[in-house]
Amino acid sequence: MVDGICETACTIAFEEESGLLGNSSKVKCQFINNEDEQEKSNFERFAEEAQEALNPLSLQLDGHRVCKNLLEHDEICRKWEDLLPVIQSKYSGEWVEKQLQAVTKRIYDKDNLYLSLCHHFIFSEWLMSDIFNIDFIDNHGTREWVEYLFDTTIIFRQDCFLEKRNDKQILVIDGTANMEPNDMQAKELWVNYEIEERLPICLEQHTEWKGDDLSRLPESIRSLYIMKIQGKSVKTIEIELKFQ
C-alpha cells in the first residue's frame, strides 16, 4: 500500500472453446504468478500455492459470453486434496489453519466457489457485465444493472454510449446508485467502511470498453467506481484489464 492506495495485479491466461451451435462456449482460465525481482512474502507464497487448486479452471458461458457455471468442480476438489498436505507441511500456525479451513470449505461448496470467482474483479468486469444485453437506439442505451462492489451488491442505473475513436469501438458506461438510509446495502456500507449512520451514499461508475470489434475480445476494459458521502469522495476503486 502506497499513500493510502492499495494495488492488486493479476494475470490470467485463457482459451475459449465455442459450442457447436454457437449459443454457448467454455473458457479455460489459468492464474499466472507474476515473476519479478522483489522477494515474495510468506503470505504471497502461501496464496499462490493455494491458488494452484484452481489452475486451470473452466467456466461455461452463454450466448452473450456471460459466465453461467463452473465446470470440472470435481477436478478442483481432487487437486485441493493433493495440495492441502503439501501446504500444511510448509506453513504452520493458527492463522494458516484458519485460512486452510476457510479455503477447504469454499472449494468443496461449488455454488460458493462459483460466486467467489464471479466477484473476482477480472471476471466481474469482463464475463459478468453482459454488454450484449444493452438495447441501443442511436448508439445510446439505458438499463439497471447489478454490480458487486465495496463488498456488497449495488444496483446501478447505467447510461451506455457507443462511440468510434481512431478506428476503435468504444463502449462507455456511466452509472449512478443513490443509496437511501433504509437500504440494506447502505447499512452494510456504513458498517464495512465506518460511515456515520443515516448519511446518504452516492456511488458513481465510469467504464470504458475499447477494441477493434467489441463483439469479440476487447483490447482493454477500464472502470472507476467512487463512493461519495455528502458530495465528498471517501472510497475509490479503479480497475484496468488489458487483453493480449
Image (spheres, grey):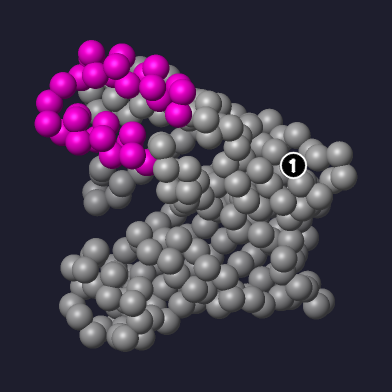
* Segment tinted magenta in the rendering: 77-106
Q: Quadrant of the N terminus?
A: top left
Q: State the residue at coordinates (72%, 51%).
A: 62
Q: State the residue at coordinates (40%, 25%).
A: 80
Q: Viewer-proximal residue, 87 or 135?
A: 87
Q: Main secondary structure of the magenta part?
A: helix
Taking the view exactly as shown, the residue that stands out farthest to the right is 21
| Amino acid type, mark 1 | Ser
Q: State the residue at coordinates (76%, 46%).
A: 24
Question: Vertical placement of 244 versus 115: above or below?
Answer: above
Q: Quadrant of the C terminus?
A: top right
Question: Vertical placement of 89 versus 173: above or below?
Answer: above
Q: Viewer-proximal residue, 194 or 56?
A: 56
Res 169 → quadrant:
bottom right
Q: Viewer-proximal residue, 232 or 55?
A: 55
165 sits to left or right of 6: right
Res 135 → quadrant:
bottom right
Residue 65 pos. (x, y %):
71, 50
Residue 236 pos. (x, y %):
36, 61
Question: Is residue 165 shown to the viewer in this render?
Answer: no
Residue 90 pos. (x, y %):
23, 14
Q: Residues within 10 Å of mark 1 (few under 14, many from 20)?
A: many
Q: State the residue at coordinates (45%, 29%).
A: 77
Location of mark 1 (residue): 25
Please tell me whether mark 1 sits on a helix, a strand or a loop.
strand
Question: Is residue 173 shown to the viewer in this render?
Answer: yes
Question: Vertical placement of 195 versus 152: above or below?
Answer: below
